[in-house]
């Protein structure tokens, strides 16, 4: 009944001492009507473009779309579960929404290490989500990575 995300690597932790520029991780998730309804419930964002078929038909999207922040949450899942993983703390995230995600779309959320500041334990990640060959979201994250020195 629940659509699970498919990860390309096991979930866990990669400590800052083991990170390298260019490392990438991703997950695949098919966005369901239930996902959209649950996000609306939790966020209290009940914009009808997400929930009402007839309303959404008359918008520029010509149909219902998922919340942008639901899509962005998939990036959070990759960062918090895979790269760097458990123990990571978000410091910032920029987002640009490029195209809509619709119910039934399979989103590939990917992060890539672009910079590492070992002294401050800060890692910069290029982030993006795509549906097929269409980039639907892109941005950059700054995180505080876990370290073996503090475990």
Image (cartoon, helix red, strand yellow):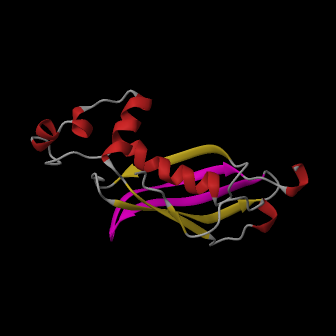
Place of residue 72 in the rendered image (x, y in percent of width and height, measured from the top left): 45, 48
Place of residue 27 in the rendered image (x, y in percent of width and height, measured from the top left): 50, 63
Q: Nearer the viewer, residue 112 or 66?
A: 66
Q: Is residue 120 above or below residue 20?
A: above
Q: In the picture provided, is 126 more to the left or to the right than 120?
A: left
- Which residues, given as a range, are shown in magenta? 121-144
Q: Nearer the viewer, residue 94 or 63?
A: 63
Name the residue located 47 percent from the left edge and 57 percent from the top edge. 4
Q: Is residue 42 magenta?
A: no
Q: Residue furthest right?
A: 149
Q: In the picture provided, is 32 more to the left or to the right than 86?
A: left
Place of residue 60 in the rendered image (x, y in percent of width and height, measured from the top left): 15, 46
> Which quarter of the figure has residue 43?
top left
Q: Is residue 89 above or below residue 127?
A: above
Q: In the picture provided, is 144 more to the left or to the right than 46?
A: right
Name the residue located 66 percent from the left edge and 50 percent from the top edge. 143
> Which quarter of the figure has residue 91?
top right
Place of residue 42 in the rendered image (x, y in percent of width and height, measured from the top left): 44, 31
Q: Nearer the viewer, residue 4 or 112?
A: 4
Q: Nearer the viewer, residue 7 or 134?
A: 7
Residue 67 can be seen, yes or no: no
Q: In the picture provided, is 101 more to the left or to the right than 41?
A: left
Magenta stretch prevailing secondary structure: strand
Q: Residue furthest top?
A: 44
Label total for image: 0
Q: Is residue 141 magenta?
A: yes
Name the residue located 51 percent from the left edge and 54 percent from the top edge. 75
Residue 7 can be seen, yes or no: yes
């Amino acid at each position: 009944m629940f659509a699970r995300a498919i990860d390309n690597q096991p979930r866990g932790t990669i400590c800052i001492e083991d990170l390298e520029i260019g490392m990438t991780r991703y997950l695949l998730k098919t966005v369901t009507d239930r996902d959209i309804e649950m996000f609306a419930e939790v966020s209290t964002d009940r914009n009808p473009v997400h929930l009402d078929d007839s309303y959404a038909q008359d918008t520029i999207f010509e149909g219902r779309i998922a919340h942008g922040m639901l899509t962005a949450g998939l990036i959070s899942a990759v960062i918090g579960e895979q790269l760097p993983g458990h123990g990571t703390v978000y410091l910032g995230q920029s987002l640009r929404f490029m195209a809509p995600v619709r119910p039934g779309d399979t989103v590939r959320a990917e992060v890539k290490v672009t910079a590492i500041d070992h002294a401050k334990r800060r890692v910069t990640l290029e982030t993006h989500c795509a549906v097929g060959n269409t980039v639907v979201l892109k941005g950059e994250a700054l995180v505080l990575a876990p370290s073996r020195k503090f475990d």
